[in-house]
Image (tube, helix red, strand yellow):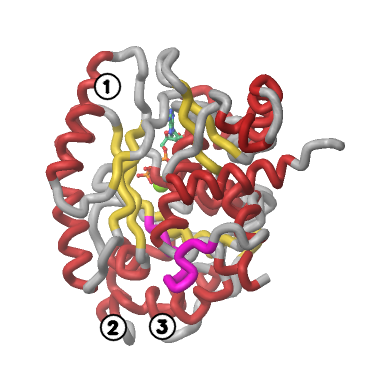
Amino acid sequence: MPVDYEEVGAELARMFVEGGSFPTINGQLAQHWGIRPPAALFRVKQAVKHGYVAYYQNGGEKGHYHPTAKALAAATKRGWIRLGADRPTPIVAVYSEAGGVGKSTLAREIAVAAARAGLRVLVVDTDTQGTLSGWLLGEIEREIEDDETILPIFKGKPLPEPLVSNYGPYVIPANRGLGELERLVRTALGGTAALKMALQKQADEYDLIVIDTRGGEGAAVNAALTASNLLLVPVQTSLKGLQGLPMVLEYVEQQAALHDLEDTFLGVVPFMYRPRGTADASIYEALKAVLTEEEGSGRLFSPVHMRPGVFRNAELNGPLSFEGPTEGDLHFTVAQILTEVAQRRNLLGGVLRG
Ligand SMILES: Nc1ncnc2c1ncn2[C@@H]1O[C@H](COP(=O)(O)OP(=O)(O)OP(=O)(O)O)[C@@H](O)[C@H]1O
Ligand SMILES: [Mg+2]
């Protein structure tokens, strides 16, 4: 009988969620399935290939596995796991103090991975540059109108009807007109919280909402962070990234206090990591030290390696392939992030409902 890899993926997701990790192929899995170890190894490798498992091996050491969103969805559909069912829909804002560190890239891949796993995903672009909506709606060869963006929300209107990306997610795009937000927020009913209120009304319709920010400070950023209930921060593995981190953490803390939120800092994603550079390794260690010192400051996700060619190609030709990611691939980190999101919020609300 052919092996049902969805079931294998679901089983591995359950093992991970129940145990925090699942056994490497040293006989335990073979025993679990009642097959020989080489057959178990083959089964897991196929699960990796089919996108249910992310795998990484650290310099010849024992491997580590993570269920992908696809595996979590499969396990939930079968009723094998119920993650955060009593919690709200995750609304993840991707934020950094600095520009060009990978915010839109990270937002794109999280949204697309979750959509490919069968989740209903809404992407909200709050950056006047419209980078993310441009990537996701590449096929739309026309200007985005102001009333398709979040702008009308600040004039008392509801969330606009989202566009649909060929890659799966629903998208509320951005355009230059969002620059007006800085002024509008002052007069808007609800002010900075107008976006939050508009998203709350629709949150039940989605499994995951991802908000891309333009970084730095300002009304649009405040509105985005206020609307979110989880915050994810990409940091370049450089001295500049490290030096900027305390400021980001302080900002995060202020936001959390202001809005009386708990458990909202998802963590930091080291970006553009050069595995061969010793400088990057020591900066990674320093990031780790900062994050473990600070209470409630989220976790440090697996670093995303610097791969200019791959990422340039993804900008032109669409999101990365996510089958069988290994350490250093953005999709290994995305699998980690989605697992963490599922543990803190109701990531799979739609799957449970449907
Ligand atoms: N790991 C990586 N290796 C190499 N290039 C990368 C990597 N991640 C992202 N890039 C590229 O770096 C550039 C900046 O990424 P991105 O636009 O996601 O950053 P951003 O933080 O959203 O920028 P902005 O502040 O302008 O919004 C893009 O060209 C992207 O394709
Ligand atoms: Mg961006």
Q: x and y percent of residue 270 in the render?
A: 33, 34
Q: Residue at image x 62%, y 40%?
A: 52
Q: Residue at image x 14%, y 47%?
A: 294
Mark with earlier residue (2, 1): 2
Q: x and y percent of residue 234 in the render?
A: 33, 42
Name the amino acid, label 2. Thr
Tell which quarter ligand 1 is in.
Answer: top left
Name the amino acid, label 3. Lys
Mark 2 touching mark 1, by CB under 8 A? no
Q: Is residue 108 left or right of residue 283?
A: right
Name the amino acid, label 1. Asp
User: Residue 304 lies in what quarter of the image?
Assistant: top left
Q: Nearer the viewer, mark 3 or mark 1?
A: 1
Does residue 115 show up magenta in the picture? no
Q: Residue 155: which disc?
A: 3
The residue lying furthest to the right in this view is: 1
Please name the residue that numbered disc 2 is placed on.
187
Q: Residue at image x 52%, y 27%?
A: 326
Secondary structure at numbered mark 1: helix
Q: Residue at image x 53%, y 75%?
A: 204
